[in-house]
Image (cartoon, rainbow, N blue to C red):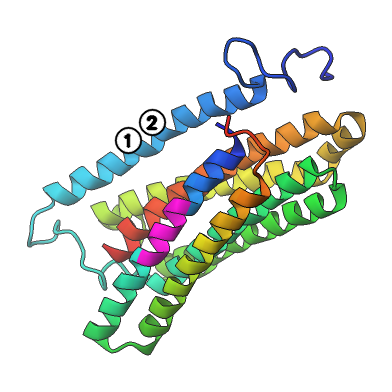
Amino acid sequence: MSAEVLPYTIKPHPVTGLYNGKFGVWLFLASEVMLFGALFSTYIFLRIGAPETGPAAWPSGEETHLSWKIGGLNTLILILSSVTMVLAWVQFKMDNFGKGRLYLAITAILAIAFVAIKFKFEYAHKFHMDIVPSTSVFFAIYYTMTGLHALHIIGGVVVICYFIGPGAKLWDQNREYYTNRIECTGLYWHFVDLVWIFLFPILYLL
Amino acid sequence: MSLKAFHIIFVVFSTLTALGFGFWAIRHYRVSGEQAALIAGIGSFMGGAVLIVYGRWFLRKLKGVSYL
């Protein structure tokens, strides 16, 4: 469906002050805040309620088998990916399609690197040691939160790759519409990266 | 809120995380003596400084773009 058929894909809606795509993404992100907010709350309550000793006690740093080096590297990768994502949007706004697409590709590569590190060096290592979600309450919430976050990253990669590939045709038809779609993707991407910014310290450092 | 505004918020949180991680890593080094922690700590402080500089550059570059 073209931009002419759908209203307010470029111009802001008079009621919300935003074009409809951006308003929709913010509504979606509000639901995501509730989803991840519930999981963060669950983590806090489980940790506060855990006994100090015994098999149900909260594991210490070493017992979690989480490497701060891998977590830190992945944090750096995601911060860089947010920077490249916003730079892609800036390039499209400046009518520079080639550079914008290059930054999108770098964002996708960084995101794939994040997921690869997560699966290869964290999940595979833990599965090899027979550490699964049913191992303990900590690992249940760890796999739930990081797994859900990884799924969000994979979803973001699919969208970014779509706009690098088949979705790029929209640029020839309507540049502003395409740039707005990249902005919406960027908003989602920043949210997913912001979730990791909170996940990293609570799981790996505290 | 535009991507510009959200990016500024993201850079602020990233900077705080970099500085916080820097403090954590230096403390970890003092407790464990792990050389990698010292390198990570210094690197993280430098990363935080880079993010502050980048944030200022970004604000200047997108002066004409709306926050909404």
Q: Residues within 10 Å of mark 1 (few under 14, many from 20)?
A: few
Q: Is residue A185 left or right of residue A41?
A: right
- Does A85 lie within the magenta span? no
Q: Give the range drawn in magenta.
A: B12-19
Name the chain under label 1: A
Q: Which of A126 and A206 is in front in this view?
A: A206
Q: In which quarter of the image is residue B63?
A: top right
Residue under the image location 66 percent in, 24 percent down: A21
Type of amino acid at the residue the image marks with label 1: Ala
Circle 2 sits on which residue? Answer: A34
**Rendered view: A75 above or below A69:** above
Main secondary structure type of the part rendered in magenta: helix
Circle 1 sits on which residue? Answer: A38
Residue under the image location 38 percent in, 77 percent down: B41
**Rendered view: A84 above or below B21:** above
Q: Which of A136 and A153 is in front in this view?
A: A153
**Rendered view: A94 above or below A134:** above
Marks 2/1 in contact by CB < 8 Å: the verdict is: yes
